[in-house]
Image (tube, rainbow, N blue to C red):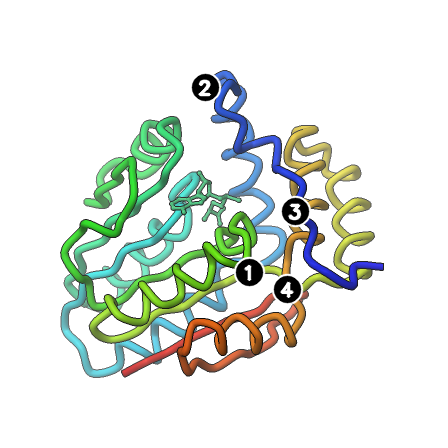
Amino acid sequence: MLTARAHDPELMDAADLPPATYAQVLGDLARVNTVTMARPMTLHWLVRATKGLDSFSLIDIGFGHGDMLRAIARWAAGAGKVVALTGYDLNPNSAAVARTASAGLGIDFVTGDARHAPAPDFIISSLVAHHMGDEELVDFIRWMDGTARRGWFINDLHRHWVAHRGYQLLSTVAGWHPIVRHDGALSVRRGFSRGDWGRLLDAAGVRAGVSWHFPFRWGVESVR
Ligand SMILES: C[S@@+](CC[C@H](N)C(=O)[O-])C[C@H]1O[C@@H](n2cnc3c(N)ncnc32)[C@H](O)[C@@H]1O
């Protein structure tokens, strides 16, 4: 079971999903991120990676509800760092939702592909790599490695039956939106083993650190 990455499409990626439903899905996804402690591992990496820097620029690929960028903006303000934070998301319905939830934090939310954006110091993504097929992900890793001036970080899921079963139970008890329940469990199946990361990084020709984080996440990182 779960020996290879699943490739079934996620319901939240359907182009005909009504914007109001999509907004509900993103809201619940931000709640999932809180309950499953999704943000601390990226924040801890960023604290290390920005040590000694008074200012930096960062882009978050696939920002969704924008909760990771809000957490970074609040941490940076508390740490006295000047930041230029930009999110890119392919789904045209994400930006309005994230902007409303992030008012006053000075974060720029853009719809579209980040590949034409000016090179930032850091590039991050959370729960986005598993949306990509292997070939697209290899290209993405190469692009991040060639573009980020100071470093990059992928935060994504460990494909493991305990995570799969645990998420099904948690999401049912929590009463999250049916799409979030379906896609979350599928996301674990679309997720990664340690061996997958070795294979994908080799294919990209990129050297990066891979670390496991509780509960059932991978951090894939490079700092210059
Ligand atoms: C599962 S959601 C994760 C959202 C958020 N990062 C989080 O952790 O909750 C995946 C998001 O990535 C976006 N996305 C998927 N592939 C993308 C890509 N290649 N470039 C930019 N955004 C992408 C989707 O539109 C969606 O908003």
Q: Is 11 rendered above or below residue 131?
A: above
- Which residue occupies 30% across, 33% down? 99
- Which residue occupies 62% across, 70% down? 196
Question: Marks 4/1: CA distance?
Answer: 8 Å
The disc placed on residue 156 is 1
Q: Amino acid at mark 4?
A: Phe
Pointer 4 residue Cβ closer than 8 Å to ligand 1: no
* 28 lies left or right of 104: right
The disc placed on residue 72 is none
Q: Quadrant of residue 104?
A: top left
| Mark sitting earlier along the chain (3/2) | 3
**Pick the front one: 57 or 137:** 137
Q: Check disc 2 and report the residue beneath it.
A: 19
Instruction: Please state the horizontal and vertical placement of residue 1, each as a whole percent of the image.
Output: 85, 59
Q: Check disc 4 and report the residue beneath it.
A: 192
- Which residue occupies 56% across, 32% down? 12
| Mark sitting earlier along the chain (4/2) | 2
**Pick the front one: 63 or 197:** 197
The disc placed on residue 7 is 3
Instruction: Please state the horizontal and vertical placement of residue 212, each as a whole percent of the image.
Output: 61, 75
Q: Amino acid at mark 1?
A: Asp
In terms of secondary structure, where does tag 3 sit?
loop
**Residue contact between numbered discs 4 and 1, judged by CB atoms under 8 Å:** yes
